[in-house]
Image: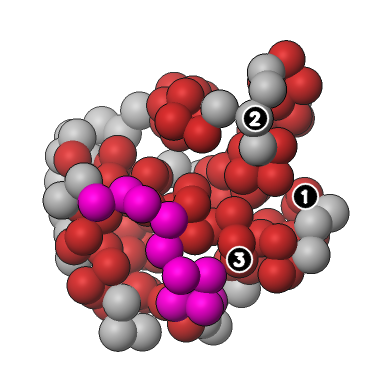
């Protein structure tokens, strides 16, 4: 069973935003853990979004501007990959990422798994399912 399937099952059992939960599952499935998030953070810095990463790491996890997310992850193929995995439109994915990505980055940086400049710390990252449950707990 893939992470996306697990998310779908959890969402079917709970009330809330199914789109955001599907995007969370698609994101974690695409990134495959802290190493993928580290690479994404590095890419965000290269795209001029280091300030966003810093805000999220400091616990400011309110949804970001979807257009800022698109610019921050530009060229990574992330939006299209998640859209393909979830069957959602790229615009819907971008809106979902604006809510989900701050939570994922905040969780991994505040728990010492990834630095704000995208370096792995050597502190073992939580299992993808555990990270997913943490993010879904904040969404649902």
- Which residue appears at 59% of the width and 54% of the height? 96
Q: Is residue 59 left or right of residue 2?
A: left
Say above or below: 7 vs 89: above
Q: Residue furthest top?
A: 13
Q: Which residue is rendered at x = 79% and y = 65% of the image?
A: 89
Indicate whether 73 appears above or below 140. below
Residue under pointer 1 = 86
User: Badge 3 is on which residue?
Assistant: 94
Crowding at mark 2 (Cα within 10 Å: few <14, some 14-19, many 20+): few
Q: Residues within 10 Å of mark 3 (few under 14, many from 20)?
A: many
Q: Nearer the viewer, mark 3 or mark 1?
A: 3
Q: Which portion, as a residue range, is magenta? A: 60-70
Of pointers 3 and 1, the one earlier in the residue sequence: 1
Question: Disc 1 to disc 2, how far (Cα)?
Answer: 17 Å
Residue 93 lies, in percent from the top left, at 66, 60
Q: Say which quadrant the N terminus sits in.
A: top right
Residue on which the image places disc 2: 16
Query: Magenta includes 110?
Result: no
Q: Nearer the viewer, residue 73 or 67?
A: 67
């Amino acid at each position: 069973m893939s992470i996306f399937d697990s998310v779908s099952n959890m969402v079917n059992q709970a009330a809330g935003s199914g789109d955001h939960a599907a995007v969370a599952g698609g994101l974690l499935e695409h990134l495959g853990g802290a190493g993928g998030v580290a690479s994404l953070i590095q890419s965000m810095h290269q795209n001029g979004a280091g300030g966003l990463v810093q805000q999220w790491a400091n616990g400011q996890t309110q949804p970001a501007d979807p257009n800022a997310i698109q610019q921050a992850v530009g060229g990574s193929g992330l939006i299209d990959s998640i859209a393909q995995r979830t069957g959602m439109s790229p615009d819907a994915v971008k809106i979902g990422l604006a809510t989900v990505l701050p939570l994922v980055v905040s969780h991994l940086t505040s728990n010492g798994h990834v630095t704000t400049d995208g370096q792995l710390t050597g502190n073992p990252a939580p299992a993808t399912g555990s990270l997913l449950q943490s993010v879904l707990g904040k969404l649902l």
